[in-house]
Structures are given as structure tokens and as C-alpha cells.
Amino acid sequence: MQLLKCNLLLFTFLITINSNCQVLDYSWKQLVRSSNGEWYKSQEAIDIAENVLLYQRNIGGWPKNTKMHKKITEKEKQELIQLKQKPNGCTTDNGATVLEMTFLSKIYKETPDERYKQAFLLALNYLLDAQYDNGGWPQFYPLIKGYYTHITYNDDSMVNIMFLLKNLFKKTGVFSIEPSEDVLSRAKTAFDKGIECIIKTQYKQNGVLTAWCAQHDETTFLPAKARAYELPSLSGQESAGIVLLLMSIDNPSTEIKTAINSAVTWFEKTKITGLKVERYKNEKGEGEKRLIKDENATPLWARFMNLEDNSPFFCDRDGVIKTSLMEIGRERRNGYKWYSDTPNKVLRQYTNWKEKWD
């Protein structure tokens, strides 16, 4: 029933987009990823594109968690113009910058305004400049002190960048804007360095390759801490995105094959069966989350697993490790994705990948 509701909502959303109706109630990510075609010729899409151009900083990046499709006042426009020369806050976290580039590519295909192309290329240059020499990407560029300087796999930040670069230099047609051959060469080099970084950061547990942390130290490559409740660990969520990226590579090297095979072995070892995450209302009518038994449940993986023994753990904002979801407070329990089913996608694709490449 829940799946049916989600599908109906998505169907309704797509109809809304394609008929030039109100889109402001939907998330920016949903709008960018779901909308295509004729809608990008509409005045509504063109108005949103103006916002996207305004929010872009002169360095090429965008801030995160911004509803680019929300109407802005004249005063806000002037403030955004003043902010353009300030690079602080530009990031690839939560899909930022890559989402805006995707939007610009889609609207350029239907409404070929040269400004969209130039903004896209400026953003591409930003991504290439932001990469470390070791192949990783920080969460923010220019760099911000703190955990933001770590090589960031969290929420697929680095994976999103690398898929974008791969689609560009492979000329897949996913993006309507084609950079020059020199820039494509830079993109290819950046991608290759990124793969080298991924191979180097795969964690060895008692000498055995396993998976990845949500972030790794940019100097030592070791799993690193982010926020108080995001301790060094192995990640079921972020590791899945990394393996899907590796499996998309044609003619993979021996190192890439080893990385994939090792990660899949780890996914099989750490999957949680017979349990599912249930959302419900408590006696106060507040949304809650808990883990319940269900023999037919899709396998799950913990977001955080102990580096020594893969045991799942959970934290409140005090950083104290707990062994079960119900031991942490309501705010963090319900305000964070502690389990993931994304590795199932890896396992579904693995057999075909192995037959083809290994």
C-alpha cells in the first residue's frame, strides 16, 4: 500500500510538471530528477533557471539545501547578487552543485540560452578545481576547517561528481552541454584519480578488504569522524553508491574487480534479514520510527558499523555509542537514516557484472 501511494504521488508530480502547474511544494531534488521534456520550454522552468543562475557563486558552485524553485523577492535578488563574489558555502553535499548542473543541462536542451551553458561549464571547472591531488573531494570548496575537509562519500557526494564526469567524457548524451576536448580530458583525469582514491580508502579489517566510511581523512585515508553522531565506521549506505560506480566502469582493472568482489562479500556478511524499519504515530500523534520483525522484509544494512567487528551502532548528538536504535533519543532516531536497503541494488547487479567482467 505504501509503495502504491509513493507511485501515485510520483505520477501526480510528473503530471504537474508536464502541465506547467505549481511545483513549489516539491523538493528541489525531486523536481530536477523527475522533470523532463516540454516543461523546460515553459515560462515556469525559465523563471526557475533565473533563480539557479542567481544562486550560483562566481567561483562556480552552489550552496546546499536551497529551494531553487521558490519565488524570490526583488530584495532577495539583490542580496544574491551581492553574495555571488563570496565563495563560502559552495558544496557538493546533499546533491548541491550537481543538481543545479543537471537542471541547467535539461533546460538548455529545450531552451538553449547560452547563459545556461556558461553556468554549467563554470560549475564543471569548479568541481575539477575542488579535487584534491590524491583524487578525493572535500565536502566544501573553498575548504572550511573541520570535518568538511575530509574526503566525502557521505550522501554520495563524491559518487555524484564522478558519475557526472564519467557521463561527460564518455559522451553518453546524459548531459546536453558538451565541454571542449581539453576540459573533457581534465574530467577523465579527475575521474581516474577519483577511482585511485576509492581503491586506496577501502578499509582493511584484520587484513581483509571490506567497505568504506562516509568520510576518510584526506591525508591518511583512514575512516574519519564527522558530526558527533557520525563516528569512524563502515557504511552500508555510502559503500553501496561507491560499488555501483565501480561496477559501471568498462574493462575494470584487477584492483577494481578486487574492490567490488571484496565489498560484495562484506555486504553479504553484514546484511540484516527478518527486520524492517516501521514508521508510526505515538500517543501524542508524533511521527516515530522503530525496528520490527518481518520474515518477508527486504534485507537492510546499518548506516554505521564498527570497524573491528561490523556490529551496527547508533549515536545521539553526545557521540555516545548505543547498540540499538531505540536507545537513542527521539530527535536523532527519527531525524536520520540509520538503515539502508541500497546494497540490494548492488547485489542484484553483481551477478551480471561478474559474468561480464570477472
Image (cartoon, grey):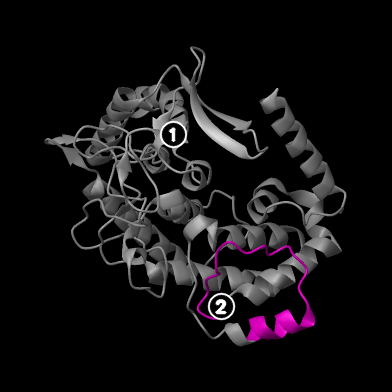
Other-residue count near label 2 (Cα within 10 Å), few / some / many at <14 / 14–19 / ≥20 = many
Q: Nearer the viewer, residue 254 or 102?
A: 102
- Magenta segment's dominant SS is loop
Position of residue 268 in the picture relative to residue 114 (left or right): left
Secondary structure beneath dot 1 equals helix
Q: CA gap, disc 2 to disc 1?
A: 42 Å
- Give residue 201's position: percent from left, percent from top: 24, 49
Q: Is residue 295 magenta?
A: no
Q: Position of residue 279 (x, y in %)?
A: 59, 31
Relative to 315, 11 lies left or right: right
Which range of residues does the magenta coloring cover? 58-81
The answer to whether residue 127 is left or right of residue 174 is left
| Pointer 2 residue | 57
335 to the left or right of 266: right
Residue 172 spot, x, y in % from top left: 54, 48
Establish if 322 lies above or below 24.
above
Q: Secondary structure at mark 2?
A: loop
Tell me which amino acid carries mark 1.
Met
Q: Which of the two residues, 65 or 60, is positioned nearer the viewer here?
A: 65
Q: Quadrant of the image for the N terminus?
A: top right
- Residue 55 percent location from the top left of the image: 63, 74
Q: Report the front residue among 191 and 28.
A: 28
**Residue 14 appears in the picture as rendered:** yes
Q: Which residue is mark 1?
A: 326
